[in-house]
Amino acid sequence: MNLVQVDSARLLAIVTDMLAEQGIVSRAEIAERMEITDRASPELGARMVAKAWREPEFRALMVADGSAAAESVGIRMRGLPPLGVLENRPGHHHVVVCTLCSCYPRAVLGYPPFWFKSTAYRARTVRDPRGVLAEWGTALPADTKVTVVDSTADYRWMVLPTRPEGTQDWSEEDLAALVREGDMIGVTVPRGPAISC
């Protein structure tokens, strides 16, 4: 352990003790939240996307109230900013950015990737979303509207991508395996099955 880790661990212990002594939050609640945060990953969001692709009722809940949809599949949202879900569809594509820092739906996607936090991504996505998408290999039809949505400390956003063609009979597990983190931010789109000629 290096000096920074020791100091960080000591600082965490001091803050935890102070919060517990003031009755603001218990040590157990802090430990639980840390465990939940450490378990969070893009696989959780991918499971939600796959479920929405297979179940219209869940899709409607997810778009109407992302936090309630997450809770319904066992993802704890208590104490977190609301989760908004932007549905991509033919003719309309969403991409998420945090223009100020790195506000990210960690409960459903885990820690933000390094590029999401970069100044270049944040600034360029707002100025030239199609250019940024092209760098990710995401080519959209010219008539597709691209909407950039700012994830903030008050409201976190994720994308419900369009289901790829040729996956109609796929299981939820197989569908979830298609969904990448970038698909749920909107910089990429899920790739469908390879079509053999």
Image (tube, grey):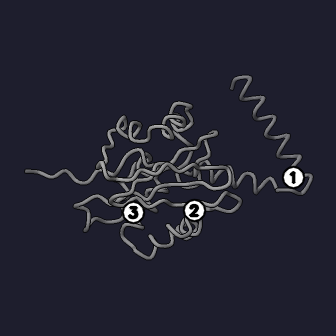
Residue 118 versus residue 69: which sits nearer the camera? 118
State the count of labels.
3
- Check the image and name the residue furthest to the right: 22
At label 1, which amino acid type do we have? Ala
- Mark 2 closeness class: few <14, some 14–19, many ≥20 residues within 10 Å: some
- Residue 20: image tag: 1
The local secondary structure at tag 1 comes to helix
Give the residue displayed 49% in from the left and 48% down from the top.
148
User: In the picture provided, is 58 more to the left or to the right than 89?
Assistant: right
User: In the picture provided, is 48 more to the left or to the right than 118?
Assistant: left
The residue where tag 2 is placed is 75
Give the residue displayed 86% in from the left and 56% down from the top.
24
Give the residue displayed 34% in from the left and 58% down from the top.
91
At label 2, which amino acid type do we have? Ile
The residue where tag 3 is placed is 50
Please report whichever mark, 2 or 3, sits nearer to the chain's N-terminal start.
3
The local secondary structure at tag 2 comes to loop
Estimate the x, y position of residue 185 in percent, counting from the top left.
47, 48
At label 3, which amino acid type do we have? Ala
Q: How far is disc 2 from disc 1 in space, using C-alphas?
A: 25 Å
Estimate the x, y position of residue 86 in percent, counting from the top left.
48, 59
Mark whose residue sits in front, 3 or 1: 3
